[in-house]
Structure formats: C-alpha cells, structure tokens
Amino acid sequence: MKQVNGYITEQEPWKVAKDDSPEGKARLATILYTAAEALRAVAVLLNPVMPETSQKLWDSLGAEASLGALAEQRIEDAATWGRLAPGATVTKGAVLFPRLEEKPTA
C-alpha cells in the first residue's frame, strides 16, 4: 500500500486531470488504472488476514463484475498484471485504514 500511495503522490493525478489534451487524458487513465490494478492485487493478498477490509476494497474497485468473487481469487494470480477490466467503475467507499491521530500529552 505504501508504494501505491507513493506512486499516486509522485504522479499527481489531480494535476494531470487538468490537462484536457488527448495525451493528458491518456496519462490520467494510465495512472488511475495502475493504481486500481495495484489495489486489486492488494485486496487478493490481504483477503486471508483482513477479509472484511479486502471485500470493501474489492467492491470499491468493481472487480467482481469482471473477475468474480474475491474469495475465489488465487493468491498465485495476484501479481498477474492487467486482470482488472479497463474502464471498470470505481466507487468511493469508506476509509479502509483511518489515519491514527496522536493525542497531545499534557
């Protein structure tokens, strides 16, 4: 997850989205697909130890429509790139890993 977050931070899709040229749109599509595909693999790999969180991520990616149920996914296939259907509808879900906030000490 840290690498996916780093990729998103480095690629700055919020800035790329402002480029309305065909090249800008293609670059944005590549960035978003790369992030979604990486998160698909994360969902499969984390499913045995975090099934509820992984299912929420799987649902947000719209992966079930093209790949089937998360429970049916093989860990051996998680690294196979390009399994998520291009153009899949990704929806915003709940925060999966809330940021921990330190309470000030007195």
Image (cartoon, rainbow, N blue to C red):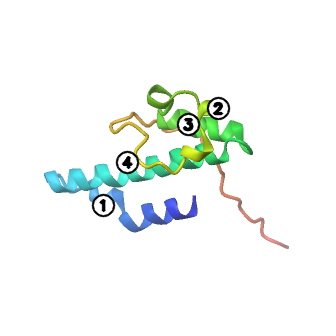
Q: Nearer the viewer, residue 102 or 26?
A: 26
Which is in the foreground here, disc 2 or disc 4? Answer: 2
Q: Residue furthest left?
A: 21
Sequence order check: which comes first, mark 2 or mark 4?
A: 4
What percent of the width, then of the height, locates residue 25?
A: 22, 50
Mark 4 or mark 1: which comes first in sequence?
1
Q: Residues within 10 Å of mark 4 (few under 14, many from 20)?
A: some
Q: Which residue is mark 3?
A: 58
Instruction: Identify the residue at horizontal 70%, vertical 36% (top origin).
Output: 52
Name the residue beneath numbered marker 4: 33
| Mark 1 in CB contact with mark 3 (< 8 angstroms) | no
Q: Residue at x 31, y 52 (%)?
A: 30
For label 2, the residue is 71
- Does the image show residue 95? no
Q: Amino acid at mark 3?
A: Trp
The three-letter amino acid code for the residue at tag 4 is Tyr
The residue singled out by tag 1 in the image is 15
Above or below: residue 84 compared with residue 12: above
Which element is circle 2 on? helix
Vertical placement of residue 24 versus 74, above or below: below
Q: Position of residue 22 (x, y in %)?
A: 14, 51
Q: Amino acid at mark 1?
A: Lys
Image quadrant occupied by the N terminus? bottom right
In this rendering, the count of numbered labels is 4
67 relative position to 103: left or right: left
Q: Which mark is residue 3?
A: none
